[in-house]
Image (cartoon, grey):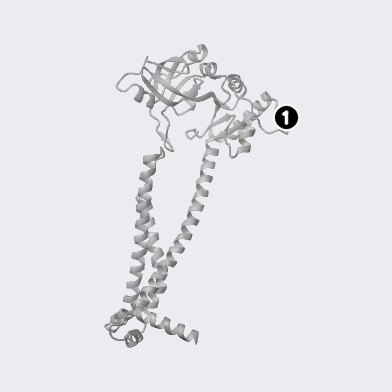
Amino acid sequence: MANLGSNVFVVCRFCMIHNMKEWVEAQKRKRFTIEDVEALREGLKLASAVGGSAGKNQDVKYGNQTLQDVNIRGVTPNMINIGQEQVNVGRYITEADYARHTYNAFIGFDIADKLFPGLDPMGKEIAFGGQSFQVVGVAKSIGSVFGQSQDNFVIIPLSTFMKMYDDNRFMSVGINVQARDQSRMQESQDEVRLVMRARRHDKFADKDSFGIVSSDAIMGLWESLTGTIAIVAVGITAVFMVVGGIVIMNIMLAAVSERTHEIGIRKSLGAKRSDILMQFLVEAAALSTAGGVIGVLVAWIGTKVMSATTPIPSSLPLGAVAWAVCISASVGLFFGIYPANKAARLDPIAALRGRITFRKHCGAGETYEGLQRKSLARARHHQRA
């Protein structure tokens, strides 16, 4: 479905299922048959091609080798013009194969590569579903979508497929309709509804007893899903940035209080307000940037773990790294403005006087922690009194 052309849509029993209720309702729908494909071929005037396809996953064997979970597809011969498969070696399924229910197979690139390494697969026989099939063609490599290979398939005539698996009620069946051009997609879908509703005797007030899905609908669903994820991700990230910024601001305020004497000495030796401001802004930015770099390293490790343990490809683009580090630095700069400004505005005389007063209260060799303990004890004494 992810590789549909811009002017192709699919008529199917199970299409865009969003919840369990829709799944239960779809189970009640009639299965599609070859007769439905032929009816649409004859009844549609606006479509350039109508092709049928059915799918099922099975193990495929060649000699002593077995490939598990291979996508077995039954198709009409014109699917070569509708789908994304292209012939690399040999040929596709022909009208003669379809009419005679032959046991010929057109295999994907992965099947040829894994079952016949270093061998010519043409004319070889593979087995699945209790039958042997002769390989008559090999497809060009298509690639993967969301980590799922699109080359792991075996294509046989739809007539043969229905003969083998017609008793399977869970079989996935679809009718691919190719409109003459993208501008006539809606008209073609309306024509399909007219033919199918008449064929299935759907009443005027009833919903369609079938589904129709196009590449635009799939992309719309995907964009809606990723858009929702992006909004949630941005919201969560914004909350964490605010929390992290507040933490950085508190750390810098504590640093300003502890380094009052240092600030006073620097100002008394000629440091400007802008120098003190820049010093604390750089410290705040460095603190937040370090957090951003650690976050990027965690994300990089996560992508490696995901790639190693799942079929979903993942990577960490350099652009994302640059944005992450820049935003982290910006958070530090923004929340570091208040502490840095407070440090820059300190009066050097008051700052040095505060240090001298501190020494007088502490006495020789006494620490700040000792003064705190004395002050706490004195406060408790006054409270009891």
Quarter occupied by residue 143 = top left
Q: Is residue 323 above or below residue 380?
A: above
Q: Residue at x 48, y 28 (%)?
A: 83
Residue 358 point in image, percent of width and height: 34, 85
| Image position of 122 (left or right of 76) | left
Q: Position of residue 369 (x, y in %)?
A: 35, 78
Q: Residue at x 40, y 60 (%)?
A: 327
Give coordinates of residue 49: x percent, y percent.
Answer: 54, 24
Tell me if residue 304 comes above or below residue 106 in the rendering. Answer: below
Using the rendered image of the protein, determine whether residue 88 is visible from the camera's viewpoint.
no
- Amino acid type at circle 1 is Lys
Q: Is residue 1 above or below residue 287?
A: above
The picture quadrant where one finds residue 283 is bottom left
Position of 193 with respect to 96 (left or right) is right
Residue sitting farthest toward the left: 269
Residue furthest top in the image: 100
Task: Please tell me in which quadrant of the rendered image residue 336 appears.
Answer: bottom left
User: In terms of depth relative to the viewer, which is nearer, 245 or 198?
Assistant: 245
SS for callout 1: loop
Residue beneath the point at 35% across and 74% down: 277
The foreground one among 168 and 356 is 356
Q: Which residue is mark 1?
A: 203
Callout 1 crowding tier (Cα within 10 Å): few <14, some 14–19, many ≥20: few
